[in-house]
Image (spheres, rainbow, N blue to C red):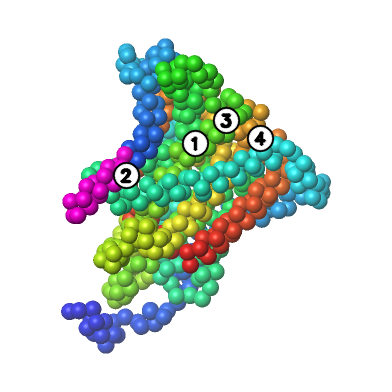
Amino acid sequence: MIQNYKTKQRLINLVQYAICVIFGSIIVVPVVLTALGGFKTLGQLNVDPVGWPNPFLWENYIKIFTESRFFIYFYNSMFIMVFTVILDVLVAGFAGFALSRFKLKGKEIIYNYILLGLLFPLTLAILPIYIQLRDLSLLDKYWGIILPQTAFLLPFHVMIFRGFIRQIPGELEDACLIDGHGKLGFLFKIVFPLSRPAIATVSVLAMVNSWNNYFLPLIVLNSRDKFTLPMGSMDFIGQYLADWNKILAFFTITMIPAILFYIYSQKHIISGLTAGAVKG
Amino acid sequence: MNLENRLKSVYNKKIINTSFFKGNQLPVFWLLIAPSVILITAFILYPVFNTLFYSVYKWNGFGPLVDFQGFRNFERIFSDQRFWNALKNSGIIVIFSIVFQLPIAFMLALIISRNNSKGIIVFRTIFFLPFIFSEIITGTIWTFIYHPTNGVLNYFFEVFFPNANYTGLLSSPDTVFGAILFVVFWKYFGFHLIIYVAGMQGIPKEYYEAARIDGAKAHHILRHITLPLMKPALQMSLFFSIIGSIQIFDMVWAMGQGDPVHAGETAVVYLFKFAIKQQKLGLGSAIAIIIFLICLVFNIFYQKVINEEKA
């Protein structure tokens, strides 16, 4: 009986594993083919998009660094991303702290006001935002992207921080007050250091969002010197219309930073989401 | 010295002012909350509020609002066949993601959290991977895969079905939207999976043990423990799936800009091509309001359904 149960369990595990492998390969195969495609000659790519690169060509990748505007795009994307993440983490962290650690009438109203922002997708609000940015003379400026995209990230991220900070025990706060620190001392000495998982979750979501944003820069930026990587990618496609090997190489390079951020912080994403948002 | 004694001694010595506890928290509170409120007001709520005004004028974005149109902008949009097609496509993406994407993500999340085979955790990393790629990259990779003459799919057909006449999924109006749907699934199911995995990790293990001791079968556990306790996670993923599906633009843009013959257009692509590119801001605002209202109704409806089902 037990033997029977064990084999059944093993069979179930095997089937489940197989399902994961199937879905996993649907994800991985296109990514691998993209990276390999960048090492192929155009001739080989056209007749054999699946096989191993032969000859194995570094040229496409080297050319991107030497001939294209890759570094300009990279710098622009980096600048926008770094300031978006800093602004987002600080502002959302402050609000999350205020909303979970102060006893105040009407606090819920403010929280709901912030959550209202979740209802409006950026792409739908793009027209009035364009007008607003023009009125503030933020068009074709980095901050014209940083400020609105941070605003659209805030509601969800305030939610994560609020949920997370609420779980920090009250005794810690009392002890901190006794040591002569105020609310702000508690925030910087205890809450921020303890909130590492929430900060990691929020930063990764902000990084990914900023790094990949295409629609907002498309509307805001005019000068090619300010283009971000996704816009640069479209520019690059236009330049090398049929040279798929160059395009694939370019894309592989732009994917690498995102993959690195993610691998670096992935274990925090789950714990941040668990504590912050999913518990409600 | 434990905390309580320490508290007492501090109070007795009057080292700190006790009014500190009740004290004036209000300025600090507003200082902390103000940046969020200002940013959200300035870049989301105030502009969105303005959309309402723009939508009843004919306006190219410059000068004052003078050419009042009443509801004529809305009438023009409602009588445009292309709008209805774009709206239908966006609706299909929403329904597709609720009916296929979320359940598949849930199933895979269950497998990842329950199965204790070695290495199963690697799949969590893999499934989330497409979420971190930009939609532009994703769309272009798949353009390469779908490519009619030298793509991966074409290669596959040549090797296994030499007689099939593969002409590229993105170049025919009959297949373009299906091809886009698949890529939407490819990119986003991992995000929902992560939300579910996070939700499942939040459920205490004792519940499962208790249920198993009581002789509960797997489907009982799923129905009476996992699902009810996952309600916040389910609601969140549903919310993001609806909002996200409506928003999709970059990916479609990278995969042929909604063509051929507008067959792949989504609501936002239509908004961009029809209004923004031609500087018809009044008309565009009307489109945005219609889509937003639909989105809102969808959301309220489904949140209600979920609330009633699992309450």
Camera-nearest label, 4 or 3: 3
| Residue to which mark 4 is pinned | B273
Q: Chain of mark 2?
A: A
Distance (Cα) linking label 3 and label 2: 32 Å
Under mark 4, the amino acid is Lys
Viewer can see residue B285: no
Residue located at (29% from left, 64% from top): B215
| Residue to which mark 1 is pinned | B182
Camera-nearest label, 3 or 2: 2
> Do badges 1 and 4 share one subunit?
yes
Camera-nearest label, 1 or 4: 1
Distance (Cα) linking label 3 and label 1: 10 Å
In terms of secondary structure, where does tag 1 sit?
helix
Under mark 3, the amino acid is Val
Image coords of residue B308 (percent x, y): 53, 65
| Residue to which mark 2 is pinned | A16
Under mark 2, the amino acid is Gln
Residues shaded magenta:
A1-18
Earlier-in-chain disc, 1 versus 4: 1
Which one is nearer the viewer's eye here, B295 or A57? Answer: B295
Image coords of residue B287 (percent x, y): 69, 45
Distance (Cα) linking label 1 and label 4: 23 Å
In terms of secondary structure, where does tag 3 sit?
helix
| Residue to which mark 3 is pinned | B176
Q: Are marks 4 and 3 in contact (CB under 8 Å)?
A: no
> Do badges 1 and 2 share one subunit?
no
Residue located at (51% from left, 70% from top): A108
Q: Chain of mark 3?
A: B
In terms of secondary structure, where does tag 2 sit?
helix
Distance (Cα) linking label 4 and label 3: 18 Å
Vertical arrangement, residue B27 with respect to residue A56, above or below? below
Image coords of residue B297 (percent x, y): 63, 56
